[in-house]
Amino acid sequence: MPDALAPAVPPKPPQPAPMPATASAPRPKRAADQTSAPVRAMHKLGLLRDIDLALHLPLRYVDETRITPMGQLRDGQTAQVQGVVQDCRIETRGRRQLVVRLADTSGELVLRLLHFYPSHQKTLAAGQPVRARGEVRGGFFGREMVHPEFRAVAPDAPLPLALTPVYPSSAQLPQAYLRKAVQSALARAPLDELLPPALVPAGLPTLREALQALHQPGPSAPIAALEDRSHPAWQRLKWEELLAQQLSQLQAQAARSLLAAPALRRSPADLAARLHAALPFALTAAQQRVVEEIEADLGRPQPMHRLLQGDVGSGKTVVAALAAAVAMGAGWQCALMAPTEILAEQHFRKLVGWLQPLGVTVAWLTGSRKGRARSAMVEQVASGAAMLVVGTHAVIQHDVAFARLGLAIVDEQHRFGVAQRLALRQKLEAQRLEPHLLMMSATPIPRTLAMTYFADLAVSTIDELPPGRTPIVTKVFADGKRGQVVARVRDELQRGRQVYWVCPLVEESEHLDLQNATATHAELSAALPDTLVGLLHGRMPQAEKAAVMSLFTGGVMKLLVATTVIEVGVDVPGASLMVIEHAERFGLAQLHQLRGRVGRGAAASVCVLLYTGPLSPTGKARLQAMAETNDGFEIARRDLEIRGPGEFMGARQSGDALLRFADLAQDDALLQQARELAPRLLREHPRAAQALVQRWLAARADYLKA
């Protein structure tokens, strides 16, 4: 394929380093130094194999297959023209610019370059045949193109036979170089059909045909269908990618079933039964159901790999406590890991209150716990004296050794990386056993996401709230009504209630004009002089954070200005009003988590979302969703539609998304087909299944094991 038109201002080539002043023999270059910049750029993009290049698909297409006569050009049209330069001169109209008059047999056109090099003047010299492409505008001196792509051509230069693809790239990787590399790789890549033809859905092309259509679409190809990914060629790629992903999940599930774990079975009068009887409340039907599901898994000699999901405030912590009690009652230790010290400390206080009266020693390990206190805790864990260990990432540090770890519980699992979860599971490796793994999430997983990224997990869902929880009313206000919101805060405080005020930043930023936590704390302290106003953010020392939270949870402090450190887990029943500054800047799942900090007592609760206009379509959709529903599952569904799977996945794939082409919000039918076919393919054609996984996922399939 001929190269695309050159940009008006090409990137400057890298300049060679100056020779040193002292004379010395030059050192031989290392192999890495001899690699060209485009090759290094391709490696950074993960384009290492022929199949990687073949699957590196265009973002959009440029139609260079036709020439539009200049006399037929219309304002606003993007077109390609070819003519002979009539005149080329530098003009100064406020700034220097290169003005070129180009003509064909039907008319004339002005090419205007506001940035240009001497080489451009040579290319665009009078009498030179030139091909240019750009947007046509109506100018004072007639129609013109400002900064078009252009190049000198022979008068009879042939036109490309296919649309010109524009690929995801970088400054060091020119499109022309990348196009040639892709075409070369397409010829070499192993694109043979791996599947029996009868298993491929009717109407889809072969993989080779699909890739050829996407990399070199003909001049009559529907550009819109290619770019919105509805073309049959795209459907083939999406279907095969989803099939490979489903196969990988099934393989991970099968591999896990071959591992050994301690069988944790309970007796009628064991610790779990005593904890259940001592609880000051009754479990909901949903809580009881998921407790039974978890207990059944714990009783098997294979490691449990279960996700416990439930909306904010649905009571996941007590379910986790009962699961821990089953493990400890069977003589095995349990570890509970949370992403923040605030959340970990809240779990610690609850679990100590429930379990210490029953004779359980609970250890506390966080980054702020150091010296002799930490050493004593580590010793208790290693000896087995501490049956339950609660903490943050400190739980998985190399010097923390468990005597008998039987159950690992990870709260807010999407906040942890693959390596962190694997490290927790490997704490039992010396005994050639794996602990059971229970992951918890207050961000419900939409059905399509559960069928893809979480297909290898058993999922337990708490789908009802405990009795007595009051619905939260959500109101959306522009920042211009800030005074009314402060007045509402004053009213709530006078009723003896407590209030959260959440800000996205700690201090002023030169780049983001956002109301910050420290300024808001000062403003509210001045507006409410009779109220103790607290400030909480992630940069504070842990002891100071703990002191502030203690005052707020104890009811001494009535108004807390905070950043998102209070996003998860904080439970203050007296808080009835939540104000969120710059709500348009937060993700939908995060807004729902923050809203869940109120409505935890008997008082009617309100969440106020303050926004600064103008709102983007995404920001408007988020705020509208928050105002319309309190249902976490509906929130999760809308979040998936708005932003895709990133928030739900978090670091599960360690930043490496497994689905490059399929869209979970649009490709449900293809997902269903892949989900139904995967078990049959694995059973009847195991070699083809493995080859398909290797083609699409390669090393990334390992992430599914975490």
Image: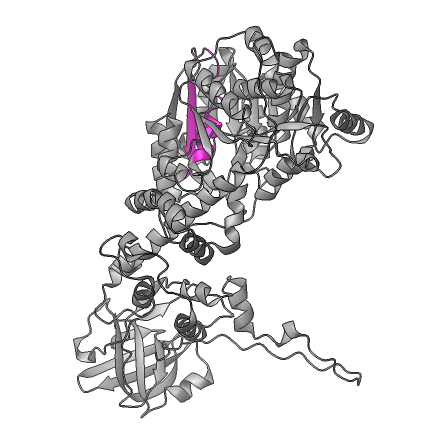
Q: Position of residue 621 (x, y in %)?
A: 34, 38
**Left-right relation of 242 to 652:** left
* Outermost residue, right side: 372
Q: Nearer the viewer, residue 587 or 380?
A: 380
**Left-right relation of 153 to 15:** left
Q: Position of residue 140 (x, y in %)?
A: 26, 74
Task: Kindly tell me whether residue 181 is visible in this rendering.
Answer: yes
Q: Nearer the viewer, residue 376 or 243?
A: 243
Q: Position of residue 85 (x, y in %)?
A: 30, 88
Location of the C terminus (image quadrant): top right
* Outermost residue, bottom side: 127
Using the rendered view, name the quadrant where residue 122 is placed.
Answer: bottom left
Q: Please say whether residue 20 is one of the residues in the magenta stretch.
A: no
Seen at 44% across and 71% down, the residue is 178
Q: Nearer the viewer, residue 102 or 663?
A: 663
Please tell me how many numbered marks the rendered image carries: 0
Task: Kindly tell me whether residue 504 is visible in this rendering.
Answer: no
Identify the colour scheme used: one colour
Using the rendered view, name the quadrant where residue 233 is placed.
Answer: bottom left
Q: Position of residue 350 (x, y in %)?
A: 61, 17
Classify 130 as above or below 304.
below
In the image, which residues are magenta? 589-615
Q: Nearer the viewer, residue 116 or 431?
A: 431
Seen at 54% across and 26% down, the residue is 300
Classify 628 as above or below 129.
above
Classify 101 as above or below 657.
below
Location of the N terminus (image quadrant): bottom left
Q: Please say whether residue 593 is one of the residues in the magenta stretch.
A: yes
